[in-house]
Image (cartoon, rainbow, N blue to C red):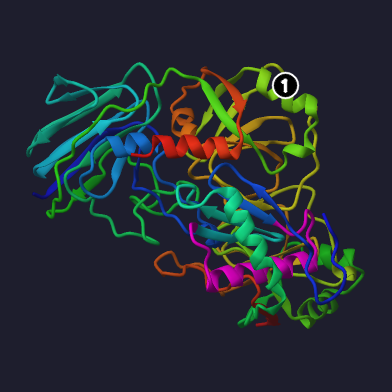
């Protein structure tokens, strides 16, 4: 099968992603890849790549050929040719069919995966869109109305979606970070006692938190020598604003980083909507790694 | 932070976890020549002879990030393996490539920088180009390189305000370093010139040409 899909409508920051462009951090390019890696995997193991949709969703029309689409991640509403379908799920789409995805109850990111590869020339080994470096995907940018996405003919397997993790839990585990010792014991304790809120300033590069309790208001630390960044790092800006750095993070940073969200919780954190509260618990690196081993198939 | 005791030794690093899948080997907490040299040596050693379970090695100015697979090796095991490698660091050859960078020194901040170091513009350009610099680090942005370190009498602080995005190939100067941009970016550094040298090609297997440790010689084009 081969197909071309036309974007009839796209919400903001809808991008093409694959597993990520790893190994390029020394060249100044963060890995990108899905904001919710587990949901990306659960949306079906078919061809290469996925369309990562954001809250407002997307509408696609099949202009030629046919394909099987798997959809999953977060909670969205989905219709094919105007008929309601179950989310997560899958559908066979033929020429002229439409797929419309609209906001659901929870979460920020969903994934559309196909039975065949998304046809884009890989850049540094990946087709993932990096919104910071403006490369990968379609011209390094978010999808917009009128874009055409081509699917390859060499299909490997049908997309078979499975349910992803529940999204209601707002307890996020961290390990203390690179500069934790630069913060006073009071501030570190305060970070674990306070409740933060996900602000409206969030994208693939980072999520700003609202610190209504003022935990970091007086945490003024002079600028530091730049070190490499990993996704999940929580950096504190000069004005005390906490930012969690996400998949399209800046490669290096000179603001102090107090903690890092553990790998097992980063997908769930990415799905927290603006206005959600978030509470942090600290765990040891060993504990975080035991969790990772226990969740691996 | 332990200092270094002589020219034949390197600063003793601290090894700090960054989350559950990375370690940072930190030779210093401020930019200094010995820490940067050790950072480059360790990176070269790990590039030539990778440690099992390490997925990516990322040198910065004075630290090396090791991203690893915790399902293959634990953080504490990896830290132990790393400490063994650090013993042999002095024997690692860096084998630098020398790059001649032809540049036009006509940047909007050239006059201000020359004045700040008490030289005429031409004398500043001559002083700037008289030293072979080292690529201290890559990775701040695609293809971006920090080169240094200049002698103390050429050190000026960053600008007080940020400039809106400057073009690809801008030559930036501040904090004892010269940097070359390979993408458009806003900057708080002084813009002293420009070059047609492009250090980033996203279609290449190795998208940046210069590596940390390489030698850079600037020349008036």
Instruction: Name the residue that disc number 1 marks.
Output: A190
Q: Secondary structure at mark 1?
A: helix
Q: Is residue B96 left or right of residue B73?
A: right
Magenta stretch contains residue B49:
yes
Please report, as a chain letter, where disc 1 is located.
Answer: A
Residue B184 seen by the camera: yes
Residue at image position (68%, 24%) is: A191
Instruction: Give the percent coordinates (x, y) of residue A194.
Output: 66, 18
Q: Which residues are magenta?
A: B26-54
Residue at image position (85%, 79%) is: B123
Between A60 and A130, the residue placed more toward the observer is A130
Point out the residue furthest to the right here.
B118
Residue at image position (75%, 70%) is: B148
Instruction: Give the percent coordinates (x, y) of residue A219.
Output: 78, 31
Q: Quadrant of residue A90?
A: top left
Instruction: Give the percent coordinates (x, y) of residue A231.
Output: 53, 42
- Name the quadrant of the C terminus of chain A: top left
Between A122 and A148, the residue placed more toward the observer is A122
Residue B99 against residue A172 in the figure, above or below: below
Residue B198 seen by the camera: no
Q: Is residue B121 left or right of residue B52?
A: right
Q: Label 1: how many residues lie within 10 Å, few (<14), some (14-19) or many (20+)? A: some
């Amino acid at each position: 099968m081969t197909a071309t899909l036309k974007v009839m409508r796209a919400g903001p920051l809808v991008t093409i992603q694959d597993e990520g462009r790893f190994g390029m951090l020394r060249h100044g390019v963060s890995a990108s890849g899905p904001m919710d890696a587990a949901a990306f995997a659960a949306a079906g193991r078919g061809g290469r790549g996925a369309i990562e949709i954001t809250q407002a969703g997307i509408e696609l029309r099949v202009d030629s050929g046919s394909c099987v689409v798997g959809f999953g991640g977060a909670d969205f509403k989905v219709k094919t040719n105007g008929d309601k379908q179950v989310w997560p799920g899958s559908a066979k789409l033929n020429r002229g069919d439409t797929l419309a995805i609209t906001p659901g109850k929870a979460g920020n990111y969903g994934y559309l995966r196909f039975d065949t590869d998304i046809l884009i020339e890989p850049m540094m080994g990946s087709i993932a869109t990096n919104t910071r470096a403006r490369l990968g995907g379609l011209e390094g940018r978010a999808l917009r109305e009128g874009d055409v996405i081509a699917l390859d003919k060499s299909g490997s397997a049908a997309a078979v979606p499975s349910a992803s993790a529940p999204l209601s839990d707002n307890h996020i585990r961290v390990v203390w970070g690179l500069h934790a010792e630069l913060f006073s014991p009071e501030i570190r304790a305060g970070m674990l006692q306070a409740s933060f809120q996900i602000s409206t300033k969030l994208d693939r590069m980072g999520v700003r938190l609202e610190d209504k309790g003022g935990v970091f208001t007086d945490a003024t630390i002079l600028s530091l020598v730049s070190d490499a960044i990993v996704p999940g790092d929580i950096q504190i800006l000069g004005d005390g604003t906490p930012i969690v750095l996400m998949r399209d993070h800046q490669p290096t940073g000179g603001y102090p980083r107090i903690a890092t969200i553990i790998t097992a919780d980063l997908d769930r954190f990415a799905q927290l909507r603006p206005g959600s509260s978030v509470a942090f618990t600290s765990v040891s690196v060993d504990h975080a790694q035991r969790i990772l081993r226990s969740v691996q198939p | 932070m332990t200092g270094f005791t002589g020219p034949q030794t390197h600063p003793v690093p601290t090894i700090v976890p960054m989350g559950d899948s990375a370690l940072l080997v930190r030779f210093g907490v401020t930019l200094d020549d010995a820490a940067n040299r050790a950072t480059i040596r360790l990176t070269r050693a790990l590039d030539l002879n990778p440690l099992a379970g390490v997925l990516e090695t990322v040198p910065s100015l004075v630290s090396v990030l090791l991203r690893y697979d915790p399902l293959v090796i634990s953080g504490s095991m990896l830290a132990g393996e790393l400490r063994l490698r650090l013993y042999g660091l002095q024997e690692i050859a860096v084998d630098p490539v020398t790059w001649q960078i032809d540049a036009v020194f006509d940047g909007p901040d050239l006059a201000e920088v020359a004045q700040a170091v008490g030289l005429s513009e031409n004398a500043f350009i001559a002083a700037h180009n008289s030293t072979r610099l080292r690529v201290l680090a890559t990775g701040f942005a695609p293809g971006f390189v920090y080169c240094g370190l200049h002698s103390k009498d050429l050190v000026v602080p960053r600008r007080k305000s940020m400039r809106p995005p400057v073009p690809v190939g801008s030559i930036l100067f501040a904090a004892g370093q010269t940097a070359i941009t390979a993408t458009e970016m806003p900057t708080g550094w002084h813009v002293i010139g420009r070059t047609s040298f492009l250090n980033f090609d996203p279609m290449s297997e190795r998208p940046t040409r210069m590596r940390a440790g390489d030698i850079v010689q600037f020349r008036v084009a």
